[in-house]
Amino acid sequence: MGKFHSPRSAPVATFSMADFSLRCLLGGITPEVFLAEYWQKKPLLVRQALPGFGDWLDRGRLSELAMRDDAESRLVRFMRGQCLLDHGPFEADDLAGLPKKNWSLLVSGVNHFLPDGDALLHAFDFIPLARLDDLMVSFAPPGGGVGPHFDSYDVFLIQGQGRRRWEISAQDDLEVMDDAPLRILKRFQPDQSWELDPGDMLYLPPQYAHNGVALTACMTWSVGFRVPTAADMVGNFLNYLHDHLSPTGLYSDPDLKRPRHPAEIPDTMLNQVAAMLKAVRWDKNAVEDFLGRYLSEPKSHIFFDPPHPPLKPASFSKLAAKQGVRLDPRSQLLFRGSLFYMNGERVEAPPEILAILRSLADRRRLPPTTPTESLLPILHEWYISGYLLPGTAQ
Ligand code: SIN
Ligand code: CO
């Protein structure tokens, strides 16, 4: 693994989240103007959105993440006019012997492993957290990229180390190649192009054709959003109903008559089953509960690390009073009204702790305070599950 570490002479990090400015991120416009004029409407290029950004990860550290089995990683290579796609986790040897040009290594969910990455992702909280997906980081040597394509989601592409040329196109022709393992556009006709330096950022709405080619060895940080399809929502809601409804009653036919065709499904059976299915009902509360659980549910490869041995409530409370608490970078805490959804699990909060729990959900941390009698059991339970940690520092 050590062979991936960058040389000692690598530049020291100059950007930290303490320097973060939302005004600067959006190029001087307010989030309100961004949402009204650009979000889901048109691209926005911001020069020096994060001045000095780029040194949190290098090729070596990204390669180490790509070897973890709790990270989603992909390797895209272009060889002899062919596109090849491999999925991680990778072995050190897979990543050490790569050519000098024309490939890209991509790791999703970097916010789960890098506390600064979690803070960067959540700096985009002028968009509801329920819409935020994850932070993906890619490394590419010169010529590397994933080919011209479009994404179904909005994306902020932040240039880390190195330089990359982005070409974009407002084209409606989104036909993709039939035989490529990635969705690569058959025809790409760029209408704008820029070279991005470290700290520059490009926002693209969904379905906007784009192609990023590394000019030097470079890293791109993508803040992506979730766009569930109607088919996803309906399928998952039906599963939710299946788990939460408890239909009662048995099929019965005391008035059964001898059938003319024994193989024919009888009318009485059809009517009785239709009546059973009519009893499947739901209201907005069920949709609300489904959404809270579904949107906060961790992806299937995410596992938490519960503390061993855990502190008892009294000691945990003392530590929280001294150091505050923060959500684990893998945790998703959402709420509606008094219902809080932590990683797919629901907690109903009493009125006196609504404000403090909402603040924890919005900011992902609480400053040092002694938890009240009704707050302590909730925080302690989340701590025991590995969802929340003492300490507010990254
Ligand atoms: C990349 O980082 O190479 C791909 C990002 C994107 O095009 O969405
Ligand atoms: Co893309």
Image (cartoon, helix red, strand yellow):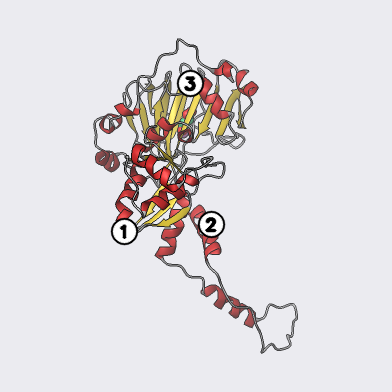
Residue 348 placed where, x, y %? 40, 58
Q: Earlier in the sequence, mark 2 or mark 3?
A: 3
Question: What is the three-letter code of the residue carrying label 2?
Answer: Gly
- Mark 1 residue element: helix
Q: Is residue 41 visible?
A: no
Dot 2: element: helix
Residue of label 2: 235
Task: Give the left or right position of residue 108, taking residue 14 as reference.
Answer: right
10 Å crowding of disc 3: few (<14), some (14-19), many (20+): some
The earlier-in-sequence mark between 3 and 1 is: 3
Q: Is residue 68 above or below residue 239?
A: above
What is the CA distance from the residue labelled 2 to the residue labelled 3? 40 Å
Above-or-below relation of 251 to 43: below
Q: Give the image quarter of residue 302.
A: top right
Report the front residue among 106 and 381.
381
Q: Which quarter of the figure is the N terminus placed in?
A: top right
Q: Which mark is residue 351?
A: 1
